[in-house]
Image (cartoon, rainbow, N blue to C red):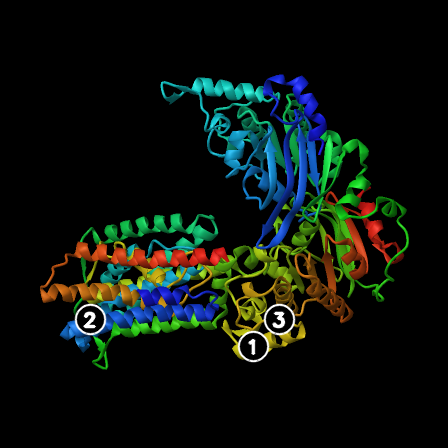
Amino acid sequence: MNNVDSIDLVECDMPSMGALSQAPEVVLSMQGIDKRFAGVPALSNANLALKAGEVHAIIGQNGAGKSTLIKVLNGAHKLDEGEIHFLGEAVSYASPHHAQMAGISTIFQEVNLIAYRSVTENICLGHEPKRFGMVDWRKAHAHARETLARFGLELDVEQPLGSFNIAIQQLVAIARAVALDAKVVIMDEPTSSLDEKEKAVLFRVIKELKSSGVAILYVSHHLDELFQICDQITVMRDGKTVEQKPISAMSKLDMVAAMLGKDPAEIAKGGATNFAATGQVSDEVLFSVAHLKGAAGLKDVSFDLYKSEILGLAGLLGAGRSEVARAIFGLDHEMKSGKMHLSGQPVDFNHPSRAIAAGFGFCSEDRKEDGIIPQLSVRENLTLVLLPRIAKYGLIDEAKERQLVDEFIRHLGIKTASMEQPISQLSGGNQQKVLLARWLVTNPNILILDEPTRGIDVGAKGEIQALIRRLADDGLTVLMISSEFEELVEGADRVIVLQDGHSIQELANEQLTENAIMKAIAQ
Amino acid sequence: MNILTRVINLPGLKRKAHASRQAEGVLIALAVITLFASLRYDAFLSEYNIMTFLAYNSMFILIGLGMCFVIMTGGIDLSVGSVVALSSVVVAKVSEYGIEVALPVGILVGVTTGTINALVITRLKIVPFIATLAMMLGARGMALVISGNQSVDVSWESNFTQFGLGKMFDFIPWPVVTMLLAFAFCWLLLEKFAFGRHVLAIGGNEEASKLMGLEVNRTLFGVYVLSGALAGLSGVMLASGFGAGQPLEGLGWELSAIAAVVVGGTLLTGGLGSITSTLLGAILLGLIFNILNFENGLGTISFSAYWQSIIRGGFLLVVVVIQAKMMNRKKAH
């Protein structure tokens, strides 16, 4: 760390702080941070140095440990190992609230203020100006107006916060941080729900904060915007902080390479394939998507899906991969536009049950949140989608159910004590196999897999990848989303690269390499 | 209580085993209390006491069964007590046409209120607590309006009161027969039908259920209609057994039903539950009343109805505390 170098500066710039104080510029440092969840390391030896008046970006793939780092810093998680120094003192906060009171404010993705209270109350809550023991509202309103005016914002501060849009609410959250005299402001994906104009306002506010000496920790998946406002970049990978550089010393390609742990020179070359093109893909278009637009930044995605191929969807988080899958499957229907054709016929599902009836299956990204039903057994989880088809007048044909479950447990090699074991007791890989079986048992034509091998051990991963290939060889058409380019290159016949809600490139045959995908993303 | 504690604290139980062990726990508590009572009170195991006890508690068991389904989806139905009163008043008015008419009418009253609950919850997206709270007030008001705040006499000429007071084969009271049929129906529905599986899936993980294309709204609809229908049936028993439609009866019954479900080990968070345990839970709670009545009869101590309620509340609290501990232990893993 450069603390040592800057100690001299402390003493000449801010002699009042005394000889004991640390670096003047570094307001916050995290050293050797370790954090484990149930023994699994989420952070290992992570380091960070944050200087006054800088905007410091943390970037990394999903699961790299960015959120954990922030949560350890603001007291949402307790660290296992390491030290945090803030304004020269070793600190540890019991909660984000304590951190905020001490001068470290976190602006969350979802604004966590009180929507039905006024703007003033949200800014002043906990430190209201008092008069004779009662809140002096006139003063409070004036104070709120003043704080907002610093960002060039004029609001009716007596209105409930909820009556303003998300962008304004976020600015109010920042204003609250400023009103609390924050020295460090943490912003987690602040632009994810903002449009261009709102983004410009936010950036102006960030610059204003910067000039008043506040240090800003900025987490974002949108690499382009980092060049507009950031000074420093810390790259995280697998729970470690692998690189810290001024942004001027990095290109977008460098960032992508560092996030994925690859050599940028090699990516730039593009170059030779590691894998030969897999099996012959038929030329029959089974399903096509044209100009799909929808929820959460899905803007314009088009592609054809050929019969019995594995089509990969690549892109960074936030590029719209899962949104494509959800839109196809009839979720988030209200926000959708675009055309879809199945075997040449126009289709538009407004409910997952319609998509299922048409032969689709969808293994979603987050096994725990929206995959397994933890209280139910392997058997019950496996047959939930199939159930109406093996029931007569709603009465389940149990013999048939057991026979099918037994067959799939053996067929997919699911390791479970019995089919009656609760699914929550299985390993991640085996849970994933049960979820795959849940769809396979319905005999689908098109299976959408969103991160089919995330968070499962290497052995099970290989098994699942081999299984997907085998299924495609047997005629199943697969749309596979993955953050792992290696998996896409090895597993998919073709890959569509998504960026910022657009399908920007198709890669197949000898063009399909990890480097080519990265190059497309970094364009 | 020790045995119950130990049994439901066993870690890592399978769901089925878990449910059956809950039932086992309640069963052990029941056995202990029954043994104690049969030794202490001569008349306790008499045919008269057993049948009267079961007939009276059938009303509570019915709404407990409906409540169990609602709670398994992660919801709640506060309206059942009022619906019992409303149904009793309505069927008293039509009692002259006989039980053949009154029975379907009573059930229809419950189906109607249940449908309204379900519409408010699934279409207007109002949380079940508030939606059914509104129905609790509304149905009570309706019962008072229809009855003119008076108990409504039933017809003694028709066969209406036969349902509440008569016995099958001169042995089993009709309410008990009805209750056993309803129990069998609910048990089958949960264990053998796709509907029951969907109820558990939705209570366990609603987001996953939606992604699987399960008809979440339709299932919730069925659950609230079922709860209403059983409350309506309970109202028929009330009017028929007591010879009057009673607009002020059923106060707090929804809470007794929730208590029975909770004592049976069904978690209020949804996704887990057992029909058998609910039946046993309702009987256990009823038994405590029964024993206190005997105690009063012996004249050793005199418990007023108020004290009975306090004792029952304390008992419920103990069970819930044990459950909460069990939940925490599960989370810690």
Q: Would you call the spot at circle 3 few (<14 residues within 10 Å), some (14-19), or many (20 or more)? A: some
SS category of the residue bearing label 3: loop
Q: Nearer the viewer, mark 3 or mark 1?
A: 3
The residue labelled by disc 1 is A402
- Point out residue B139 in the picture as x, y percentages from the top left corner: 31, 52
Residue A313 left/right relative to B177: right
SS category of the residue bearing label 1: helix
- Point out residue A4 in the picture as x, y percentages from the top left corner: 70, 29
The residue labelled by disc 3 is A415
Of residues B23 and A357, which is closer to you in this image? B23
Type of the residue with mark 2: Ala
Badge 1 sits on which subunit? Answer: A
Q: Is residue A128 visible?
A: yes
Of residues A53 and B279, which is closer to you in this image? A53
Task: Name which residue lies at 51% across and 39% down.
Answer: A95
The residue labelled by disc 2 is B37
Residues at marks 2 and 1, common chain?
A: no
Residue A220 left/right relative to B286: right
SS category of the residue bearing label 2: helix
Of residues A282 and A433, which is closer to you in this image? A433
First-in-chain label (3 vs 1): 1
- Point out residue A474 in the picture as x, y percentages from the top left corner: 76, 71
Residues at marks 3 and 2, common chain?
A: no
Task: Name which residue lies at 75% across and 70% down.
Answer: A470
Q: Nearer the viewer, mark 2 or mark 1?
A: 2
Q: Pointer 2 and pointer 1: residues touching (CB < 8 Å)?
A: no
Residues at marks 3 and 1, common chain?
A: yes
Type of the residue with mark 3: Lys
- Residue B62, located in which quarter of the rendered image? bottom left
Type of the residue with mark 1: Arg
> The N terminus of chain A lies in which quarter of the figure?
top right
